[in-house]
């Protein structure tokens, strides 16, 4: 089987020749799923030289069609011979057949495919903003004090990050304080144990996710802007500092909150594997002891998976109301705090994406693989740098600090 | 049943080639349990098996099988209690001797006058019955030299021979690693069957995550001469290959946490 793809004005035209049967169906499926992953969601198959289509081939087409449906894409076959046309009609997939000549799909060169920088910026709600409250402001390497502990509810418009526990007592290690992040009231929490997987709390009916937090930046409101980004000839990936800087530029703000949903090139960060508590100070004396407290990624992690990141970024010369924003080595003009949750890869629809729908989609899909406090590793020679993303979406809004914060 | 207490072994001590292969290993294996040891290359898993088998004496610590302290027993003395299957399918059998003759030797292992009994009709019939359970058709080839068999067939017979006298402890040292995938799967299946049927206590070293998940009751993970994870009971039942790979990943990541990382974390993990 031979597969050749040509970019057209509105779709990807894929000429296939040979037999689409059990021997080739896996290769065919993988090739097409890769097209979808690369953002091609309108796929037109020129089946003029497709000589045979078996049940295994139809199963491949069904799989591809389902994947396209998830991102509101489209699959069509043109120029199919009588056998293929008859097979698809008999099996109830006649809707995939279309009557278009390949030359009617305008072929475009790679050059004209490049989009201007702001093509994918969308203003969602011009005046929207995120009002951020510093709920609790414990800093690592200290003993937890009772006044730092706050029971906190997360509503449907909540975005938050920090360190917290679903347990309700301040009880040393048993409190199980771990890194968490919240999107539209959906809370993901990393149990502070080396072996554990992230757990999550989803708002359903009257249930409102609640955590006992010791460190929590809690924002409420709506996002004002959306930026869709994809690899470009000159820039194949985006660093989180570039995305954060972009959030400030788009919102024209000194401080901004952002949510990134994107395919991951590599995440750099750490998470807590031992809970701090009231009974003991969290003060590692050396790196051997540090190993008992934090798990550091060691190398860029979760490549190819989908990351969902919530962060707050500030220009360095703006006041930091929380004391929890850390200067970025990759962009010394910025300070940031961001947590990520990692889900198995799912393609994203092109164009404007509704944040709430996407959050619901991911939290109702396969379970998250990890939660991470993102870091910018600037160690000389050995440093891993910052987290990188290849394709996705970033929602953002200006931050307004709530007055009565801790 | 098997009690390993504070066992340490350093090869080439006080030289540039010094290797601290076992660092104070403490491990108790219950009677009738099947334990698997996994770990990275050089983690000490085969060294631990060799220490139990008596290939060398540990520098410190004790090894007990049942009530017997076997720490200073030689390898052949331990053969009375311990059966062993090696990675090399040609290691456990004599190629020029027939299948039946090889098995007779295994039947007499550990006895004081091992070669007194001849291969008579009833013995041969007993051998045939036991070999039949391998489902390889070897019961009809008992008079063929064992050297004419494939690696998988020889390893199956080696397994049968090692367990013929129901040893107190069975050691399996990557015993499927040198076989093709199909033979390896067959031997893995036989291993599980024989251990469960005979209610043997077994300790297996493997690189196969699939075998580690499918076969034993307990998984021990070693790294740099130490036991770093121990999955048993309910935790073993829920463990899957990705969990083991994650654990390997975590153990190796932990090694990457050095002074420079700690310094960065103290500054930036706020």
Image (cartoon, coloured by chain):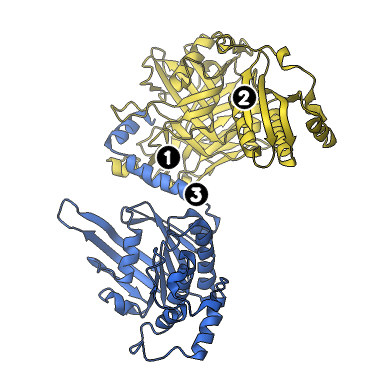
Chain colours: A yellow, B blue
Q: Quadrant of the N terminus of chain A?
A: top right
Same chain letter for marks 2 and 3: no
| Nearer the camera: disc 1 or disc 2 | 2
Earlier along the polypeptide chain: callout 1 or callout 2?
A: 2
2 and 3 marks in contact (CB < 8 Å): no
Q: Which mark is residue A4?
A: 2
Name the residue nearer the viewer: A181 or A358: A358
Identify the residue position indicated by label 1 in the image.
A272
- Which residue corresponds to the image point at 58% horizontal and 37% vertical from the top-left? A210
Q: Position of residue A13 (x, y in %)?
A: 67, 20
Q: Position of residue A202 (x, y in %)?
A: 63, 37
Secondary-structure class at tag 2:
strand
**Looking at this rendering, what residue extends furthest in the right direction?**
A90
Q: Disc 3: which chain?
A: B
- Which residue corresponds to the image point at 60% horizontal and 39% vertical from the top-left? A201
- Which residue corresponds to the image point at 40% horizontal and 24% vertical from the top-left? A323
| Nearer the camera: disc 2 or disc 3 | 2
């Amino acid at each position: 089987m031979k597969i050749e793809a040509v970019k057209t004005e509105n779709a990807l035209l894929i000429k296939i020749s040979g037999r689409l049967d059990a021997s080739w169906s896996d290769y065919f499926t993988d090739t097409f799923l890769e097209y979808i992953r690369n953002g091609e969601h309108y796929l037109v198959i020129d089946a003029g030289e497709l000589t045979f289509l078996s049940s295994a081939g139809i199963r491949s087409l069904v799989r591809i069609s389902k994947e396209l449906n998830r991102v509101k894409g489209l699959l069509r076959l043109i120029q199919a011979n009588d056998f293929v046309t008859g097979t698809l009609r008999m099996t109830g997939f006649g809707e995939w057949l279309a009557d278009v000549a390949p030359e009617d799909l305008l072929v475009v060169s790679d050059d004209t495919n490049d989009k201007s920088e702001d093509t994918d910026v969308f203003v969602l709600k011009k005046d929207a903003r995120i009002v951020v409250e510093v709920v609790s402001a414990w800093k690592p390497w200290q003993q937890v004090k009772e006044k730092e502990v706050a029971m906190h509810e997360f509503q449907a418009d909540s975005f938050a990050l920090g360190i917290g526990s679903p347990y309700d007592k301040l009880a040393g290690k048993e409190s199980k304080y771990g890194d968490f992040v919240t999107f539209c009231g959906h809370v993901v929490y990393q149990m502070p144990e080396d072996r554990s997987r992230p757990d999550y709390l989803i708002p359903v009916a009257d249930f409102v996710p609640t955590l006992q937090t010791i460190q929590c930046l809690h924002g409420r409101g709506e996002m004002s802007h959306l930026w869709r980004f994809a690899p470009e000839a000159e820039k194949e990936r985006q660093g989180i500092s570039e995305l954060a800087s972009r959030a400030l530029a788009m919102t024209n703000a000194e401080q901004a909150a952002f949510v990134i949903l994107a395919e991951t090139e590599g995440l750099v960060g750490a998470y807590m594997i031992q809970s701090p508590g009231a009974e003991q100070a969290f003060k590692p004396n050396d790196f051997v002891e540090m190993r008992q407290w934090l798990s550091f990624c060691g190398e860029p992690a979760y490549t190819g998976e989908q990351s969902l990141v919530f962060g707050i970024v500030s220009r360095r010369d703006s006041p930091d109301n929380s004391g929890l924003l850390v200067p970025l080595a990759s962009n010394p003009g910025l300070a940031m705090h961001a947590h990520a949750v990692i889900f198995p890869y799912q393609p994203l629809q092109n164009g404007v994406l509704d944040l709430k729908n996407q959050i619901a989609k991911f939290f109702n899909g396969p379970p998250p693989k990890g939660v991470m406090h993102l870091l910018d590793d600037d160690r000389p020679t050995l440093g891993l740098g910052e987290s990188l993303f290849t394709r996705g979406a970033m929602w953002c809004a200006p931050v307004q600090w709530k007055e009565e914060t801790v | 049943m098997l009690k390993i207490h504070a066992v340490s072994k350093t090869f080439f001590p006080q030289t540039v080639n010094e290797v601290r292969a076992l660092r104070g290993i403490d491990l108790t294996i219950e009677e009738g349990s099947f334990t698997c040891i996994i770990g990275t290359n050089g983690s000490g898993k085969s060294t631990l098996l060799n220490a139990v088998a008596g290939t060398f004496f540990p520098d410190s610590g004790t090894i007990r099988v049942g009530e017997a302290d076997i720490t200073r027993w030689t390898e052949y003395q331990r053969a009375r209690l311990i059966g062993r299957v090696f990675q090399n399918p040609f290691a456990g059998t004599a190629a020029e001797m027939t299948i039946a003759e090889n098995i007779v030797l295994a039947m007499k292992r550990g006895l004081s006058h091992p070669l007194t009994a001849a291969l008579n009709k009833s013995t041969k019939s007993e051998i045939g019955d036991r070999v039949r359970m391998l489902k390889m058709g070897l019961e009809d080839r008992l008079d063929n030299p064992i050297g004419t068999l494939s690696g998988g067939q020889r390893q199956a017979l080696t397994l049968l021979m090692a367990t013929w006298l129901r040893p107190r402890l069975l050691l399996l040292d990557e015993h499927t690693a040198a076989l093709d995938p199909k033979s390896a799967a067959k031997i893995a299946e036989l291993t599980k069957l024989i251990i469960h049927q005979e209610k043997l206590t077994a300790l297996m070293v493997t690189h196969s995550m699939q075998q580690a998940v499918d076969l034993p009751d307990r998984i021990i993970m070693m790294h740099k001469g130490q036991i770093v994870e121990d999955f048993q009971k309910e935790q073993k039942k829920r463990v899957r290959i990705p969990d083991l790979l994650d654990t390997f990943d975590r153990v190796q990541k932990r090694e990457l946490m050095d002074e420079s990382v700690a310094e960065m974390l103290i500054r930036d993990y706020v």
